[in-house]
């Protein structure tokens, strides 16, 4: 039976390239219905590395695609009494350790767009030379081979701090030489190399979650979810102080009960640490996001190993861009870009050979069914809960 007009609702979906798409979905529609609509509109069948997100309680929250949208959106959306349009975002949810896993070129363009926006906001001061290399890849991906005047707006390709440190004239003088080095490279390969190299910057391939040390939401903690594991920092006097870098291979388990998250890892003091989320809903989705990323890591580990073996004789060395741009051999400098590109092209070629026969499994355990009359009741229950009780279900995700 066709959905009646009064059973449809409007949504505005913002893509990573800032394009806005207005779509309609059934009032009982699920997140997957939105993804399916986007796939049809964009003619992209591979959106499995992306997720639908919104900001709730000042935190980024990825929607469970199997849940009804009404679980996350205002009641007025379901009742069709909204005065303002509802906006959700299509964002990168999974950071792959090999950019060649993004098989579809159109999906890669969206992926690239978000990673580029992250690079423009990145502040890894000890990797200044890498930003110039990334700018060259970005220019090739977006504009093709070098032409005079290609880069006239440095802010479109460099973080503001580099422009302030080096100056516009310096960037316009030296970036073209790097761009010329990759003449003839296809835009899709340049985009993938941009993504691959951008992940060297530790503040790019991460999703940030805010947690607390205590039940009363005291003691701010920043949990960064990366493709390689979890990074934990503490907020002290308004500044972020690094605490732990936990690789997937070292984490034993993560237990979630109510708002409480317990992480067990040999690297932690006493073998475990306990944090509290803003709400049960956030804790639930954080655990799911972590488990999904870990499973993706396991599924793509073989591909990452193959790339590492291909690249094992070439150690990455970054060129620090000096005022005179002289390149001398040292452990702190990057060899001429053409050598890096030759190596990168070999990685792309070798990876493409094996990719077609290697499948990805993105499934996760089905959520426990909750028997309630209305899904909104569950959401309101989550929001009311301020701590864990002995009656709260305990969920454990084991890493080994």
Image (spheres, helix red, strand yellow):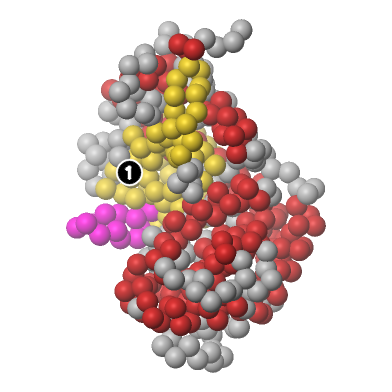
Q: Is residue 192 visible?
A: yes
**Image spot of residue 302 (x, y percent):** 70, 54
Q: Residue at x 44, y 32 (%)?
A: 12
**Image spot of residue 169 (x, y percent):** 39, 81
Q: Is residue 245 visible?
A: no
Q: Main secondary structure of the magenta part?
A: strand
- Is disc 1 surrounded by few (<14), some (14 to 19) or many (20+) residues within 10 Å? many
Q: Residue at x 39, y 33 (%)?
A: 87
Q: Nearer the viewer, residue 335 or 88?
A: 88
Q: Nearer the viewer, residue 70 or 22?
A: 22
Q: Nearer the viewer, residue 381 or 246?
A: 381
Question: Eyeballing the image, is 91 above or below 1?
Answer: below
Please give left or right for residue 232 compared with residue 139 in the image: left
**Image spot of residue 80 (x, y percent):** 37, 16
Q: Residue at x 71, y 63 (%)?
A: 348
Q: Quadrant of the C terminus?
A: top right
Question: Eyeballing the image, is 68 above or below 362?
Answer: above
Question: Eyeballing the image, is 290 above or below 156?
Answer: above
Range shown magenta: 232-243
Instruction: Write down the residue under mark 1.
Output: 211
């Amino acid at each position: 039976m066709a959905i009646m007009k009064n059973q449809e609702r409007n949504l505005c979906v913002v893509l990573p390239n800032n394009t806005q798409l207005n779509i309609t979905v059934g009032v009982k529609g699920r997140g997957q219905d939105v993804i399916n609509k986007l796939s049809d509109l964009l003619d992209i069948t591979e959106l499995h590395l992306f997720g639908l997100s919104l900001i709730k309680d000042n935190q980024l929250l990825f929607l469970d695609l199997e849940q009804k949208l009404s679980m996350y959106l205002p009641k007025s959306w379901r009742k069709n009494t909204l005065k303002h349009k509802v906006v959700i975002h299509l964002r990168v949810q999974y950071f792959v350790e090999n950019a060649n896993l993004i098989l579809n070129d159109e999906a890669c363009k969206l992926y690239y767009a978000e990673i580029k926006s992250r690079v423009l906001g990145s502040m890894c001061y000890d990797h200044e030379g890498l930003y110039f290399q990334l700018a060259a890849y970005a220019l090739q991906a977006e504009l093709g081979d070098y032409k005079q005047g290609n880069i006239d707006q440095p802010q479109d390709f460099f973080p503001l701090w580099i422009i302030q440190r080096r100056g516009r004239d310096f960037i316009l003088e030296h970036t073209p030489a790097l761009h010329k080095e990759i003449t003839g490279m296809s835009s899709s390969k340049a985009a993938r190399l941009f993504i691959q190299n951008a992940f060297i910057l530790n503040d790019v391939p991460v999703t940030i979650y805010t947690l607390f040390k205590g039940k009363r939401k005291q003691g701010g903690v920043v949990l960064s979810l990366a493709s390689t594991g979890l990074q934990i920092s503490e907020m002290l006097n308004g500044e972020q102080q690094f605490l732990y870098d936990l690789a997937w291979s070292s984490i034993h388990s993560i237990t979630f009960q109510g708002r409480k998250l317990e992480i067990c890892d040999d690297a932690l003091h006493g073998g475990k640490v306990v944090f509290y989320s803003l709400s049960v809903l956030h804790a639930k989705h954080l655990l799911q996001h972590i488990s999904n990323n870990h499973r993706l890591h396991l599924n793509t580990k073989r591909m990452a190993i193959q790339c590492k073996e291909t690249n094992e004789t070439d150690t990455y060395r970054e060129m620090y861009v000096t005022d005179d741009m002289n390149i001398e051999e040292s452990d702190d400098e990057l060899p001429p870009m053409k050598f890096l590109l030759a190596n990168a092209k070999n990685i792309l070629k070798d990876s493409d050979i094996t990719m077609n026969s290697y499948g990805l499994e993105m499934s996760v355990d089905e959520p426990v069914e909750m028997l309630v009359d209305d899904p909104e009741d569950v959401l309101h229950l989550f929001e009311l809960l301020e701590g864990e009780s002995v009656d709260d279900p305990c969920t454990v995700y084991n890493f080994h």
